[in-house]
Image (cartoon, helix red, strand yellow):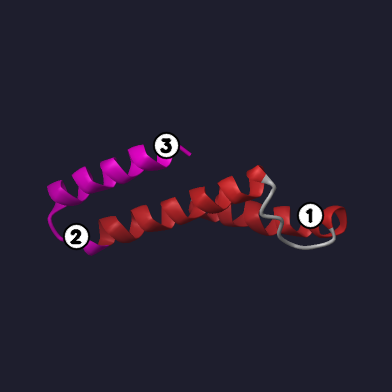
Amino acid sequence: GAGYAGLCLITGSLWGAPAWGTFWEWGDARLVSMLVLFLTLLGYMALRAAIDDEDRGARLGAVLALAGALN
C-alpha cells in the first residue's frame, strides 16, 4: 500500500506540473490526501516494527489504522 501511495504521489506531481505550473499544489485535496495516507502507512509500519510485544503492537497499530481510516 505504501508503495502504491508513493507511486501515486510521484505520478500525481508529474501530472500536476504542466496543469498547475508547479509540482505540488496544497489546494488539491487529492494530492494532499494521498500524502496523509502515505505518511499514515509509513507510521503504521514503523509503529509495528518498533514495539516488541506483539499484542501491544497490534493494538496500537489498530488504533493508528482507525485514525488513518478517517482520511
Q: Amino acid at mark 2?
A: Ile
Residue at 65 percent across and 43 percent down: it is: 30
* Closer to the camera in the image, 42 or 16: 16
Residue 51's mark? 2
Give residue 39's position: percent from left, percent from top.
46, 56
Q: What residue sits right under mark 1 in the picture?
A: 16
Residue 48's mark? none
Residue at 50 percent across and 53 percent down: it is: 38
Residue at 43 percent across and 52 percent down: it is: 41
> What's the magenta region?
50-71
Give residue 15's position: percent from left, percent from top.
79, 54
Q: Amino acid at mark 1?
A: Gly
Image: 10 above or below 30: below
Residue extending farthest front: 27
Q: Is residue 35 left or right of residue 65?
A: right
Give residue 6's position: percent from left, percent from top.
58, 57
Q: Is residue 21 left or right of residue 41?
A: right
**Main SS of residues in magenta:** helix
Separation of marks 3 and 2 at Cα, in angstroms: 22 Å
Dot 1 or dot 3: first in sequence order is: 1
Give residue 37's position: percent from left, percent from top.
50, 48
Q: Amino acid at mark 3?
A: Ala
Dot 1 or dot 2: first in sequence order is: 1
Q: What residue sits right under mark 3 in the picture?
A: 69
- Mark 2 and mark 3 in contact (Cβ < 8 Å)? no
